Amino acid sequence: MISGKTGGLFEGVFHTILIAFIALVAVFFPSLYYLSAILIPLPVCLLVLRLDARYSIIGIVLIWFVMLVTGQELMLLIMILQYGFLGMILGLLIKNRVSSGKSLVVIISVSAILALTSVAVLYALTGENPFVLSQGSRQFLEQMATINQQAFDGLMSEEQTSFIKVLVGFFEMLLPGQLIVSEAISGIVIYFLVRVLLEYLLKYELPKLPAFSEIYLPWYSIWGLIIGLVLILLGDQATLPFAAWAGKNILFVLFNAYLFLGLSVVVYYYRKINWGMLLKLIFVFLVFSYLPFSITVLLLLGATDPLINFRRLPALKE
């Protein structure tokens, strides 16, 4: 198990230098920005575990000095907001022995909140709305859709152009939801990277992970679906574009969560039912052969499981 403050000064200096090095990699190799962002929380988390949360703040301040030296203040500020503070929170969760299930929920929620906060800061400092595509980005997406136009073969040339513009507009409308989903996935990846580092390299004892087949949403999560639908209806009926925009993004995020939850339900019964290997292989083949139908079934399972509790999980009976 990790010792508390052994070699505190040396460890503090080592981890802060490591944080600064990862930040510099993002500055000088922009293509590695995402990898650097994923790695930043690891040394920050270790600072909290081995020493104290105050030491992690020192590491974050060091990134600020890196900003001043390199002139990349904006990029590194976003990295601090999204991933530096995420590392601090992750370290505090592990240090306080919070269960893995609750830790994952907190990390996913905090990742989404920090991402939206970073967008708000970016908008306040630059005046550019990250949720509005630039002309160059819009043209790039239209060109990519044109290149992959096999799905539009049945449409006339004018109809194809119109459809592509609608498709790009739909993509732009769902940018907030895409950001939340992508950052939630990043948070999950970071959490598992930290677990691997602590358990297998540093031999740190962590709470057991919940089984994938027993992941669930509480019954009151259905209110998210209701709110999303109400906002869309309100936006359409009362001509409130912002309400409809917010509702569609809420549903986009929920549909991704329901897809994940529906897969958990399927995996539960796939493992529970004593099928022969041949039948299991046939089932998997049919699932991938009819993906639109399979995805619809997963969404329905995920949306209704919090209310029906298909797996009869004790946690959902409370």
Image: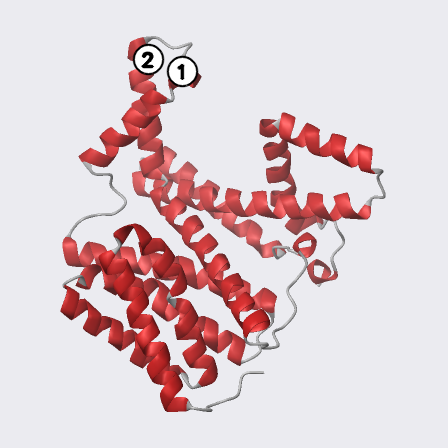
Query: At 42% across and 49% down in the image, what residue appears?
Result: 182
Q: Nearer the viewer, mark 2 or mark 1?
A: 1
| Residue on which disc 2 sits | 159
Q: Amino acid at mark 1?
A: Phe
Q: Are marks 2 and 1 in contact (CB under 8 Å)?
A: yes
Lower sequence index among marks 2 and 1: 1
Quadrant of the rendering where the N terminus is positioned: bottom right
Query: At 46% across and 90% down in the image, what residue appears?
Result: 5
Query: At 34% across and 62% down in the image, what residue appears?
Result: 82
Dot 2, how many residues are within 10 Å of its Cα: few (below 14), some (14-19), or many (20+)?
Answer: few
Q: Is residue 222 visible?
A: yes
Of the pair 283 and 1, the residue shown nearer to us: 1
Q: Amino acid at mark 2?
A: Glu
| Residue on which disc 1 sits | 152
In the rendered image, residue 252, in percent from the top left (x then y), is placed at: 46, 42
Residue 131 figure quarter = top left
Of the pair 42 and 117, the residue shown nearer to us: 42
